[in-house]
Amino acid sequence: MATPVTTVIAFIFAIFPLVSDLAVAHEGEDHGAAPAAAASGISPRTIATSDSLELVAVVRHGELLIYLDRFETNEPVEGATIEVETPVGPRLAATQPNDAYRVPAEWAKRPGRYDLIFTVTVQETVDVLTGTLVVPEPVVAREAPTSWLISPAFADEIGHKVAANGTVIVALVIGFVAGVGLMLALRRGRAAAAVFALALVLTSNSDARAHDGHDENGAKEPTESTTTDVGRRLPDGAVLVPKPTQRILAIRTVMTVSELHRRSVELPGRIVPDPNASGYVQAVVSGRLSPPPGGFPKLGTRVNKGDVLVYLTPPLQAIDQSDMRQRQGELDQQISIIEARIRRYDRLAQSGAVTQVQLDEARIELRGLQERRAALDHVRREPQPLIAPVSGVVAAVNAVAGQVAQPNTVVLHILDRSRLWVEALSFEALDNARNANARTGEGRGLALSYQGAGLTDRNQAIPVHFSIDGDTRGLRIGQLVTVLAQTDEARQGIAIPRTSVLRGPNGQAVVYEHVEAERFVPREVRSEPLDGERVVITAGISEKARVVTQGAELLNQMR
């Protein structure tokens, strides 16, 4: 039977490790909570903003790094003059291209709370910003207490694998086992050994706290915490992006404004040539193709109207060749007769037997016969030239030397690349599509001007023609585009670039709002197409918010 004395001794053994562990946090100190800066893993910093500027000052390696951006666009401000009122007096920030403004800050190595005043001069504008910099105490690491029942190595392993409550549980278990052992010793009459064991535990537990490299409270020497200013996603879904990372990712924003926008319809389309600035080189009759002296024109070659591009030699049938030979023989005979007559008339004209008029008529008749004879030779030996109907560049070539082309065969296609159209298909009548735009598969926007709409359906759709305004380089005939044409229906909303709208993990459309200098929050939105480069946000975000327009896809990938 356990006596009251043995029960009390066992209870002391059970609670002693717990009491000794809690006593490490002595009066006036709390070793369980880490400073905010160390817990967050970022360097000490202060943030100051105004209507036009946003400033972030970061302490690192004995310097104060100042990042100055435009408030609305998040664009870095270069060439500014920044004077900082520090605890050791005013200091002028040094600047270098594509780098932060730097101020020596040896005073920031001491923990404390520092009020700073930044006087920023940008061109002719002067702005005064204030901020408070908090430098936390260095993180102090504490070693968990151990006793003779647990080796120091095993205690360190337990300390890494369990939290604070886990340490308490281990202490209770150790005390319980020791108490049970003491009760058994007392029941067997070994009271002296039990009392000696109790004294040994009390002594060894207290002495183990003050050993090599530690103070008597069990605390290690203070060490400076390591900080890593890297972008990451926070538990609430927001993204923390330090200013240096924003500079690398080139994050840009825009201030949202709610306005009235006309609704747009989205139409499939393709690029076609302007019918007034393009033409075909076709074979009227069948024949064999042959190149001109300079060869067939290459793709992209500039040609002018009237240039000979291809020669076409029509084939001659056997009956045609027989008729031509017969006709040539008749003409040769008539030419010989006229030539003999002219020679005779020359002799008679000298004596006056033949008038000069008769001699001239014979000569004219001879010249006509000779021209007819030459025309027959020309038909047999010279091919038919195919000339350029318009000026432009060669867009397609279907010519090979020796190729036999059939009638209506398109040999060359010539167009003016600066004059291109877009043919769209609409399933509703568009009498006058105002402010139309097109977007290619690569995301390039094209400004369009309405030209007209058809009156007959094509595959249950109405063809609508637009001319492309502006630069047409890089476009090709037949390229598919998406046309957005405005209608008379208007809708209230916020217009932002298409690149700002992303797909969230759940498939919902989201945009990132710049709520703080280094904090971005995803907002679920509802959007509609506006033109080739913008969409209209009708729900999900308020006016006067800063929305990311460049680099949003990089923010969406942070984890």
Image (cartoon, helix red, strand yellow):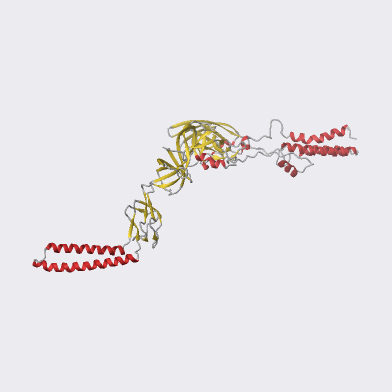
x and y percent of residue 382 in the render?
31, 62
Could one spot residue 77 in this view of the protein? no
Total labels drawn: 0
**Location of residue 243 (image quadrant):** top right
User: Vertical placement of 412 versus 522: above or below?
Assistant: below
User: Vertical placement of 364 versus 71: above or below?
Assistant: below
x and y percent of residue 428 in the render?
46, 39
User: Vertical placement of 556 versus 279: above or below?
Assistant: above
Judge from the rendering whether residue 498 lies leftward or rightward of residue 303; answer left or right.
right
x and y percent of residue 486 in the render?
45, 37
x and y percent of residue 369 in the render?
22, 64
Task: From the viewer's side, name the closer residue of 56 and 145.
Answer: 56
Task: From the viewer's side, name the closer residue of 129 and 60.
Answer: 129
Q: Of all residues shown, which one is farthest toward the left?
A: 351
Judge from the rendering whether residue 240 lies leftward or rightward of residue 401; answer left or right.
right
Task: From the viewer's side, name the closer residue of 21 and 474.
Answer: 474
Q: Quadrant of the N terminus?
A: top right
Q: Quadrant of the C terminus?
A: top right
Could one spot residue 343 in this view of the protein? yes
**Location of residue 317 (image quadrant):** bottom left
